Image: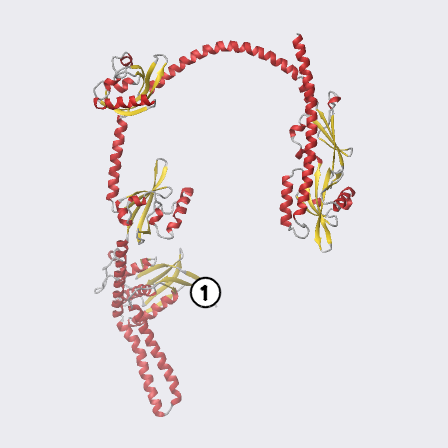
Amino acid sequence: MFLITFAILYIETQERAHIDRVTTSNANGIRILLEDDIQRRITSLTEFAKLAKVASDMSDDDWALVSQTLYDTHWGYQAIGWIDNSFHIRKITPISGNEVALDFDLALTPLALSAVLKAQKSDSAVITTPVESVHGKTGLGMYVAVFSTTKTGRELEGFIGSLLLFDLYIQAVLPTYLLTEHNLTLYINDRKIYSDKDSESPLDSRWHKQTFFELQGLSWKIDLVPDNEFLVHSHYKMIKILILLGILLSLFIAIAAYMAMYSQYRAKLIKDDRKKTENLLKNLPGMAYQAFNKTNWPMILVSDGCEALTGYNKTEFEQHNILWGDLIHPEDYAQVCQTVSRAIRTKSLYELEYRILDKNNDVRLVWEKGESVTSSYHEEAILEGFVTDITSIKQIEIDLIQSHAFSDAVVNSMVEAVITTDNKGLIQSFNEAAQKMFGYAFDEVKDKNATILMPHPCSENHEQYVAEYLKTKQKHIIGIGRELTAKHKDGTIIPIHISISEIYNCDNLMFVALIRDITQQLASEEQARLHTEQLAHSHRLNSMGEMAAGIAHEINQPLTAISLFSQTAKNFCQLGKYEKLPVLFEKLSQQALRAGQVLERVQVMTRQGDKQKEVVDCKALVGEVRHLAESEARLRDINIRVGSCDYAINLFVDRVQIQQVILNLLRNGMEAMQSISCAKGAIIELQTKRVAKNNVQISVTDTGCGLSKSMTDKLFTPFSSTKKNGTGIGLSISKSIIEEHGGHIHFSENKPAGAIFYFTLPIYEEKYLDEN
């Protein structure tokens, strides 16, 4: 009992001393924090003032940046401001919440004005006595003067000032843990300026601790009192310790009882673990074992998987009726002995593959891994390991190798280049066709970026395209065949057709490119184009031959007029009427130009060679064809009626080829009308109109004999014609020309009689014509 009483008194004494130490330490800590923080703020404001002559040199942006940095790094400021030499606040940070302080006159606050005037005479910051802010709260003002240097000396530019509101300032400066268990009251010049909570009466007034210090000419007093909760906690800590002692005693008793129960539990747990281990070994696809390191390795323990592996049961192995060495294939026995012996000498794991003969004398390929361990039970080194059947796995590997060889043979036999790359664009395979096409051996491009096969600028953008696809999965060329160009090893540019697919190889994305060299194909296409051009030229010559009579008639008229005007001019000269000669000469010139224009149109239509596309006005193009066909139309007593839309439509075409198509359709229509003696009318219409999808449609409508059903099915087929002496290539060539220009040509019936041939071309640009 004496010891317990002594322990209680000692613990109480220590607790009282602890309360006094904590309160004194907290009071001194608060004093040090306040002194240090005020001094740092004075220093930072003074340094701020030295950065630049704020009024004249520092921009608003620089002011905002520096003041905001000072505000952010020194918590507790209500605001930081710039005061000009008229004592008005002109700038303030932050603006939000401090709008009322802008343009405030410090002269309205005597204490602030006194501090500012004092700062004007000092090179460091000056602190005011507690003042009421424009927000109605108590705080401290800090001011430092800013001077500029002139020829006559220093001139006052203004002041940098800051405001600390005590509620905000104390919360920012003092850590929470200092005030958790104590009530703080702060006085400056005997004026109470802060109290963190409504003070409660302490249990004992002797815990009341005060600290005094002088700072910037102000008398500070810290009054710190532990709160009742802290005192109660400290006073009753002794009781807690005593209770803890009782608990510890009870705990020792409980531990003794627990250890007895735990021993029983561990015994049961070991039995359960043993069962789980047995079940685990039973379910393994092979045989776990312990064996003596003796000849043929007699088994100490084997798992139930031994029977599925060898055909012999667990008892036969453990009773040594069957030795493991007897099952090893005679050709592999020496290898197994050497590998196991070497692992035992080096005290390392052994791992090997070999063959065994099971109970049915079938050969099986097994994989074994084990090590030599020291057994405390047998007092000697024993072998522990695992053996599993890998016969089927090896067969799969062989099949896979054969399949891979077959696929390589197939790929290498392809005439197209087959190239695979990983998701970084590095080449992983390069078949023989690719090596022949690009001139590289596989070793030269292995793990190289596929850009070495690409010309500029494709090579520069390739990695960006791959990264964009991996990010967005939006396909641009993958899965779509496209004609591009590639680069041979010697720098030669090769036209190719490429098709790219993506595959997943062990969760890694790869790309497979199938590439075909289309150099010969493009040459064939060019030859076909030239052949078509020659046919078109021949057709034009044939058409112009048939139009010769009309053209001769067209030229004969101006030539006859020229002859008449020349004879008249001669007569006037003989009569001396020279004043009438200029008029006759003008008429002679006009008729000569007329004949020249007819010949020029014929020359354009019969010209052969490479044609150049150009932007032409659709209306002008149709008008030129009309003029060219009018002579033939007059011979056939047929009128050409032209209709056009209100829009000026531009086309990007080969002028001669499109005129050839229109002229061919006009001649076909006129021939069809003449074949029935224009019984249904003598007007053939040539119309132009804009249709959907930004296209223009040009149509030729006749009132001729029309076309039979059998003829419409093969209308645009080469060498199909309704004319006795027709070649049957006119409409076929027209179809090729229109499709080469991105358009289509069609046919429809013109009821009640005749036919309509029309074709579409894409519009290059258009503008509305002013009616005026």
**Relative depth, front residue between 636 and 17:** 17
Whether residue 168 can be seen here: no
State which quarter of the image contains the N terminus.
top right
Residue 622: name its quadrant: bottom left
Above or below, 176 relative to 387: below
Above or below, 355 relative to 96: above
The residue to which callout 1 is attached is 769
Q: Residue furthest front?
A: 345
Q: Residue 372, image x and y in percent?
A: 33, 19
Left or right placement of residue 169 versus residue 252 in this view: right
Q: Residues within 10 Å of mark 1 (few under 14, many from 20)?
A: few
**Relative depth, front residue between 223 and 469:** 223
Q: Residue 434, image x and y in percent?
A: 28, 47
Element type at marker 1?
A: loop
Q: Amino acid at mark 1?
A: Leu
Above or below, 714 relative to 191: below
**Relative depth, front residue between 302 and 606:** 302
Q: Residue at x 56, y 12 (%)?
A: 251
Q: Residue 763, image x and y in percent?
A: 39, 59
Left or right placement of residue 257 versus residue 348 in this view: right
